[in-house]
Image: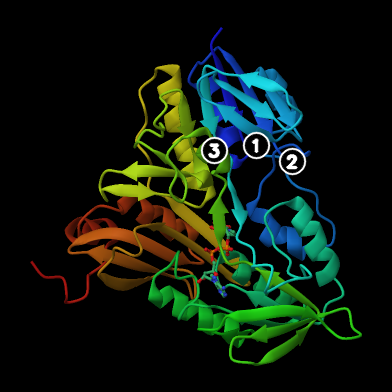
Amino acid sequence: MSSVLIVGGSHAGVAAASALRTEGYAGAIKIIAQEPALPYHRPQLSKEALREEVFSPQPLRPEGFYEKNGLVLLCGATASQLHLQDRCVVDANGQCHDYETLILACGASPRRLPEAADPERRALYLRNFDDLRALKARLGSARSMAVVGGGLIGLEVAAVALAKGVSTTLLEAGERIMQRSVSRSISNYLADRHCANGLDLKLGTTLASIERQAGGKGDVVFLEGGEALNVDLTVVAVGIAPNDGLARAAGLQVDDGILTSEQGRTVDPAVYAIGDCAAWFDPDKGRHIRCEAVNPGQDQAKRVAAAIAGRPVPALGIPRYWTHQGAMNLQMAGDVHGATKEFVLKAPESGAFSVLGFQDDRLVAVQTINAPRQFMQLYQLIGTDSDRLTAELDWEFPPSHHH
Ligand code: NAD
């Protein structure tokens, strides 16, 4: 019988299993998931899960879903070897899982500080439910916190801490926050709002080391340049590294992610890779791109599932992301770094707006603050030119609208 093995109980991995059944795939499907819990929603971990007193992870799918769809879910199992020739994955207990087709959806791990900078492992990271528990336990009684990294996790965590009255200092190595995900205008807007809420933001700043406070429970965070901060806890969120070690050791091509075709296929035609661990070839850009978010991974899952089931492969949607930081709900989509011009479109809601990014005369990116309906409307219009936008939005473009 044909069979698909999925490594990773991630958003992408579970979406692939589900999409295989939707596409009518009738073979055996097994998911190897590393954590003991049912696969769960991760985005909440740096948002409501941190804010609320009591929290348990919300499963991606209810327990009954797996059985009902004939999916074998092995929780608490780690894939430790991949043998491409034999088409089998060996888990940490030495058990061998055969496959006809393999989908690697192994996710990513937080980049950690070098041991020399944190010899006592004082820093807290946030990727899974165990990390969350450890962080909540410390944050509950904290009065001060240092956050290293002004990306999505750093800012979401800082916003929750500030709302709890924790005095928070954030160190960002770059010259602006969220450089990877948003344009400069949005970075500046977010930075202003966070600072107005009391965030002590230090741009262009890196950490030299973390030490235990002499006689205290907290940390001393030494900055490059000599300054020292005394804080109750330190959260480090300086990005992720793809979990591509299994693939690398097996001999698949890996370069900051498992390299695949634009269909998600690796150099071994029986093996696909999706989600945070995968770098898909992007024919428009002419290079491999690794997306770090829920929605693009789920899109990739649908594509791969259709290919495996022998069904028409759907087009990839335009990646979209969201983040909640204090009172700000930011949604973004498209190629924010490819835009050469930006215009601001006010939303009907008070204080809400969208930043539209253009390449020549084409809308290529949308970033919206607190206006989900406007975001969805604009999202559909990505790729269209300004004449069509003017017609659709009843919006007169600024004079720079030139032909
Ligand atoms: P990130 O890539 O979003 O941000 C990392 C930040 O750390 C960057 O701004 C970078 O310049 C900075 N940095 C790197 N090295 C540093 C150093 N030595 N000192 C100080 N700053 C440094 O990564 P993250 O915030 O760690 O998030 C991890 C992953 O989780 C990402 O893939 C992210 O997309 C995902 N995530 C997404 C959401 C969301 O979409 N809302 C929320 C949380 C997490």
Q: Please rate how many residues cluster around mark 3, counting C-alpha atoms within 10 Å: few if below 14, some from 14 to 19, many from 20.
A: some
Which residue is at the far right?
215
Whole-number angstrom distance, CA of label 3 to CA of label 2: 22 Å
Whole-number angstrom distance, CA of label 1 to CA of label 3: 21 Å
- SS label for mark 3: helix
Residue 165 visible, this orientation: no
Query: Residue 324's image quarter?
Result: bottom right
Nearer the observer, 93 or 349: 93
Whether label 1 touches label 2, CB < 8 Å: yes
The quadrant of the rendering that contains the N terminus is top right
Rendered position, 278 above or below 129: above
Residue depicted at x 64% and y 63%: 112
Query: Residue flagged by tag 1: what amino acid is it?
Result: Gly
Query: Where does label 2 land, which residue?
Result: 35
Nearer the observer, 261 or 21: 261
Q: Please rate how many residues cluster around mark 2, counting C-alpha atoms within 10 Å: few if below 14, some from 14 to 19, many from 20.
A: some
Query: Residue flagged by tag 2: what amino acid is it?
Result: Glu
- SS label for mark 2: loop
Rendered position, 115 above or below 41: below
Whole-number angstrom distance, CA of label 1 to CA of label 2: 8 Å
- Pinpoint residue 75: horizontal percent, then vertical percent: 75, 33
Query: Where does label 3 land, which residue?
Result: 249
Q: Earlier in the sequence, mark 1 or mark 2?
A: 1
Nearer the observer, 10 or 392: 10
Query: Residue 197's image quarter?
Result: bottom right
* Left or right of residue 23: residue 194: right
- Pinpoint residue 250: horizontal percent, then vertical percent: 52, 33
Query: Where does label 1 land, which residue?
Result: 9
